[in-house]
Image (cartoon, rainbow, N blue to C red):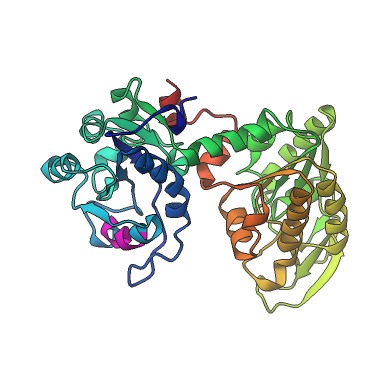
Amino acid sequence: MKTLQDFNFNAKKAIIRVDFNVPLDEHFNVTDANRIEAAKPTIDKILADGGSVILMSHLGRPKGKQDQFSLRHIVSKTSEVLGIPVLFAEDCRGTVAQNAAQNLKPGQVLLLENLRFYAEEEAGDVNFAKELASLGDIYVNDAFGTAHRAHASTTIIAQFFPTDKCFGLLLAKEIDSLNRVLNNSVKPVTAVLGGSKVSSKITVIENILDKVDHMIIGGGMTFTFVKALGGKIGDSICEDDKQELALEILRLAKEKNVQIHIPVDVVAADAFANDANTQIVDVREIPDGWQGLDAGPKSLEHFKKVIMDSKTILWNGPLGVFEMETFAKGTITLGNFIAESTANGAFSLVGGGDSVAAVKQFGLEDKMSYVSTGGGAMLEMLEGRVLPGIAAILD
């Protein structure tokens, strides 16, 4: 696996696919610069070698050229994070991009305009990829968040750099962290899978059953399992057509000697609202008109023992509706258990939009071994798929 460390970038122009799809407020200020900060070590290494950097990214889902999706809005924040002025090309192709790239001096950084202003990017157009490739000497993919897409800048471009292509430090770390969970884990391994639907996690569950010792199931998924086992779930969310599948998962887990842990009690509410009336009830005895919205205290006590005994932990999905303060306790408490286990020497990987949002919101990010930057990409890797953006570098 070729990484940044395999190259000396002295007098070379590195064209880097980054994921700078960052949130902006109504005045186009960046409200969360995490993705820009995550790419900084890769950029710093190239500049320190005496190279120059051409950054390409998408922002949002524009329909053609739309000013609100211009990467011009993030130039000042990118300059601030990198600690040097970042140059901006008003286009990502044609003479504007070519001239800007040609005039780039060692130590300089150039940001190209939004790749998705052109439909050819998402279509994986070969000629568009070739135009982008002509701007640099070495191709670096550091965008895990888009590695599962066979787009021009994430996958197709790599063929124009038969030997001069590599993973950036961020993408290499993502691959390494997932490998530590899926292929090189220290046992016991525990996967915590939350979220609302079993259907969105089926392939993940099937793929990791061979690799884990414990699986904690939380969030809305819980109730499909509980109902399948004959419990009363009141008005809780449930995929009725997935009950057979839930039973099949339990059977497979037993066969593979994987212990499945489902909440035994829940915080139930009489409405899906922060100010609803709540009560703690047995997960199998939720009254009609009530719905389970968070894991209860007995469940958390049980999960704590599993987490504290684990040496490798994967966390994908919250235990409750953490966006509402009333139902955030389960997710926060679980996060604290994982943080404590990590401090005791376990390796913890957090991934998936909601889990990542939760650890950031509750100040737990720095207490995890690694927090993934790619939701969809991480899910696909957990499903056992080879991501096109990764395969293109390994090819």
Which of the pair 55/252 is nearer the observer?
A: 55
Please say if 272 is above or below 35: below
Quadrant in the rendering for residue 118: top left
Residue 85, image x and y in percent?
A: 28, 57
Residue at x-position 41% and y-position 37%: 149
| Residue 355 on image: x %, y % | 62, 54
Report the predominant secondary structure element of the magenta stretch.
helix
Image coordinates for residue 216, horizontal then vertical, percent: 77, 46
Eyeballing the image, is 270 above or below 356?
Answer: below
Question: If the image is split into quadrants, where does the C terminus sit?
Answer: top left
Question: Residue 195 placed where, x, y %?
Answer: 65, 52
Q: Is residue 198 left or right of residue 55?
A: right
Would residue 284 be visible to someone looking at this image? no
Who is closer to the viewer here, 228 or 365? 365
Residue at figure coordinates x 33%, y 60% from the top left: 74
- Residue 6 inside the magenta-drawn segment: no
Furthest residue toward left: 95
Lateral position of residue 7 relative to residue 185, left or right: left
Quarter where residue 6 is shown: top left
Q: Residue at x 29, y 39 (%)?
A: 121
Q: Is residue 272 left or right of residue 107?
A: right
Question: Which residues make up the magenta segment?
Answer: 71-77
Is residue 362 something that shows in the picture?
yes
Q: How many marks?
A: 0
Query: Is residue 76 shown in magenta?
Result: yes
